[in-house]
Image (tube, grey):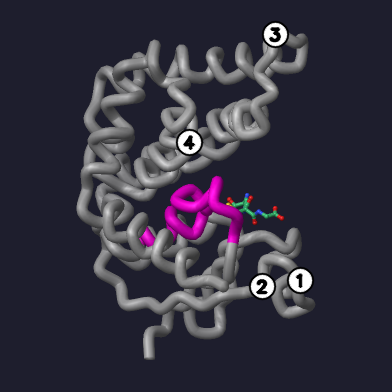
């Protein structure tokens, strides 16, 4: 039996399918070729066991033997430590990859998430709320654009930092938010063309399609 067990919801509504954060973890596991299995936790009724693994009642979490890890960034960092495919071994590349995990979550996703929630709910009339979050995201993308125009991957070679950043940006791309940022868009296209992404995406879609 695989030591690595990824837990995600047993079901989610149609709209987020293909974007649930277990995909980041599946993607990393596929890139690294690490054996794993996927388990489900109820979406509708969050159990005490769920909160014991993920204090906010969210998904995903990963167990590795007797370790239980929540937060997609922490999980990717853990997997990176298990595989040189995911985290470079040279000190500079490794430091860069670890460093980029944080702005992916704390600078870019911090802005892209509220923007995407407005988009999801169709609440994009010219209100002060929409303008605020649209500007917030653009302020981040404006600086990601020259970064990504100058390199193929964030830390020299492909790493967990790219899994995280590309997954964050791909949600923006879903709503055409990268139209004016060709380097960001090209980066998402490059990352999601990888066979490991295709496998992770197909597996997540199949997982939720099988749900009752
Ligand atoms: N910061 C967390 C966010 C996890 C998260 O928002 N998960 C979503 C699924 S993609 C979720 O559980 N949504 C249901 C909820 O928040 O109740 C991480 O990166 O792991």
Question: Is residue 190 or residue 201 the one in the foreground?
Answer: 201
Residue bearing mark 3? 126
Q: Is mark 3 within 8 Å of ligand 1?
A: no
Residue bearing mark 2? 42
Where does the magenta region start and end? 12-28
Measured Cα–Cα span from mark 3 to mark 2:
37 Å
For this view, does 37 lie left or right of residue 7? left
Residue bearing mark 4? 171
Quadrant of the image occupied by residue 8: bottom right
Residue bearing mark 1? 45
Tell which circle, 3 or 2, labels the residue nearer the N-terminal end: 2
**Circle 1 Cα neighbour tier, 10 Å, few/some/many (<14 / 14–19 / ≥20):** few
Quadrant of the image occupied by residue 131: top right
For this view, does 12 lie left or right of residue 153? right
Find numbered disc 4 in the image and state the secondary structure of the residue it sits on: helix
| Badge 4 vs badge 2, beta-carbon distance below 8 Å | no
- Name the quadrant of the N terminus: bottom left
Measured Cα–Cα span from mark 4 to mark 1:
26 Å
Q: Nearer the viewer, mark 3 or mark 4?
A: 3
Q: Position of residue 58 (x, y in %)?
A: 67, 60
- Look at 43% across and 42% down and name the residue there: 167
């Amino acid at each position: 039996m695989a030591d690595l067990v990824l837990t995600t919801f047993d079901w989610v509504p149609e709209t987020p399918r293909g974007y649930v954060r277990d995909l980041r973890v599946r993607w990393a596991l596929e890139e690294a070729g690490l054996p794993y299995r996927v388990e489900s936790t109820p979406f509708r009724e969050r159990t005490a066991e769920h909160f014991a693994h993920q204090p906010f009642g969210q998904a995903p979490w990963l167990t590795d033997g007797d370790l239980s890890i929540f937060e997609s960034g922490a999980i990717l960092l853990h997997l990176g430590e298990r595989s040189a495919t995911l985290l470079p071994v040279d000190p500079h590349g490794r430091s860069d990859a670890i460093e980029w995990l944080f702005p992916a979550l704390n600078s870019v996703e911090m802005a892209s998430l509220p923007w995407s929630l407005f988009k999801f709910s169709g609440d994009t009339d010219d209100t002060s709320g929409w303008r605020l979050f649209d500007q917030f995201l653009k302020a981040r993308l404006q600086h990601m654009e020259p970064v990504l125009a100058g390199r193929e991957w964030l830390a020299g070679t492909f790493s967990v930092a790219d899994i995280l950043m590309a997954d964050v940006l791909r949600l923006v791309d879903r709503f055409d938010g990268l139209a004016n940022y060709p380097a960001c868009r090209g980066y998402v296209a490059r990352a999601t063309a990888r066979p490991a992404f295709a496998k992770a995406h197909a597996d997540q879609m199949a997982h939720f399609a099988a749900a009752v």
